Amino acid sequence: MKRYIPTLLILFTLIGVLIGVYISRYNRHTIIIPTGVTKVDELMELVHSCYVDSTSMEDIIEETMPKILAELDPHSTYIPAKDLEATNADLKSSFSGIGIRFLIEKDTIHVTDIIRGGPSEQVGLMPGDRIVTINDTLFVGEICKNEEAMKRLKGPKNTNVKIGVKRWGEKDILNFNIIRGEIPMESIDAAYLIDNKWGYIQVTRFAENTFSEFIIALVKFLKSKCQGLIIDVRGNGGGYLGVALQMANEFLSAGDMIVYTEGAHQPRSTEYANGRGNFQNIPLVILTDEASASASEILAGTIQDNDRGTVIGRRTFGKGLVQQPFDFKDGSEVRLTIARYYTPSGRCIQKPYSKGDDKEYAMDIVNRYERGEFFSQDSIHQNDSIIYKTRLGRTVYGGGGIMPDIFVSSDTTDITSYFSQAVSNGLIRQYTFQYSDVNRHKLASFTTYESMIEHLKKQNVMNDFVNFAADKGLKARYWQIERSKKRLEQSLYANIIYNMLGILEHIRYVNTFDTTVLKAVEVLENGKAFPELTKVAE
């Protein structure tokens, strides 16, 4: 009998398994789903009711929403409630804070600029100050990160924040009680006259206050007898469509089309200039590059298609999808693509994309660089089957982005591995910050980039940097340093000017050797800013 025991155990085990399968097969948990509920709802209920482990349905939904939208297009997005305020902040006209600009260097907040009229200026905070405590808590070392610093320094208007500051030349920590206030966020970083006659405006985004800033700058130019305009939207990723329409309207005649939008559930909607613009006859140049997107492309595209001005630079990003926000009760938001933008000639600005392949889409700029598009116009892949005509019959191409009328390559002939490592390792930034800090009292006597450059050229800054970089592990390679000398000096001077004089003087200096800006000035000088003045032969 004993010899049959193993066999019987195996048999009973198999019978038990079969019974279990039978029970599970004929006692399945059935969920009754109301009519009209989707399969996704049914799946979520199944997971909630039957999954082997306990789950957080809220967490699953939060993680799933972005994946669903990613299957549609690259720009439909889901924004959790906790991120919505920060996401919208860039397009607001102001924020509540203490009114400083800062860098984090050596695990410490270094104040680089004080916003005029802000709370920090009122209590006597100064550029060069190091913030070491916030609300009586030490804030240096590993905890000192940009996001955490912003979180602690920003806050509701009229609330108090106490900071402790280490100031150059002072032995003791200086304490300041600052009442947070509304800090304006400017979207035009520079507006000034080049050669006393060409108005230059750098627009960084299309935000709530952009149009009012824009008009103020234009009025000042007219009072200064400005003879032509350069609008720089390089690096401008877009913003509010309405702002781009307002800006374009200032330059177009009544009835000129600005843009139209259309989608499967959105009938065609066309925007036209109303003829009330105050700058319809001034020579105009728009500067673009591969980071000019959305609203920037609408502005450039309508100026180009209406033959109203000249677009100079490099091909734009190619974002021509219109997103509309939809709010959820929990404070989160979906920005869903509802239509496409089209320029007056009928071009769709949007570059091609594969649904669900965000990686390929994100790599497009890198691919452009690698195939030489930044350096040669001949390397740009234009689709000759997607051609359109401007108002006067000039040929323009569809298939993604706005191709400029005049291409300006990215000049890399003097870039060496030494220069690249100095930039990528942060050595130029570190050195110029340290130089500005140590020499702050002397440098503070200069009020323009011209006077500061004259001083810096006598200080042997270049050799000092080479020694600094060598101490940080970047070996001096003198033939490479000589080849990159001009670019290195320009980068060093530009950073010091920014640290001491702010963004406007920094841009004014950089524009003296910016090849795209110089080409724009040349076009204006030669009276070529109006394409309609030249007869088009097709």
Image (tube, rainbow, N blue to C red):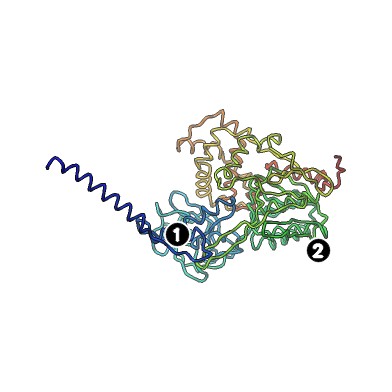
Q: Quadrant of residue 29?
A: bottom left
Of residues 501 and 98, the one nearer the viewer is 98
Q: Quadrant of residue 416?
A: top right
Q: How many marks?
A: 2
Q: Which one is closest to the eye, mark 2 or mark 1?
A: 1
Which corner quadrant holds the N terminus?
top left
**Foreground of the two, 181 or 71:** 71
- Please give the name of the residue rendered at 12% of the width and 42% of the height, measured from the top-left corner: 2
Label 1 CA crowd tier, 10 Å (few <14, some 14–19, many 20+) = some
Which residue in the structure is indicated by mark 2? Answer: 276
Whole-percent x, y for residue 403 in the image: 72, 43
Query: Where in the figure is residue 177, as x and y percent of width and height?
Result: 46, 67
289 left or right, relative to 529:
left
Measuring from the top left, give residue 14's x and y in whole percent.
26, 47
Position above or below: 24 against 473? below
Q: CA distance from mark 2 to mark 1?
A: 55 Å
Q: Amino acid at mark 2?
A: Arg
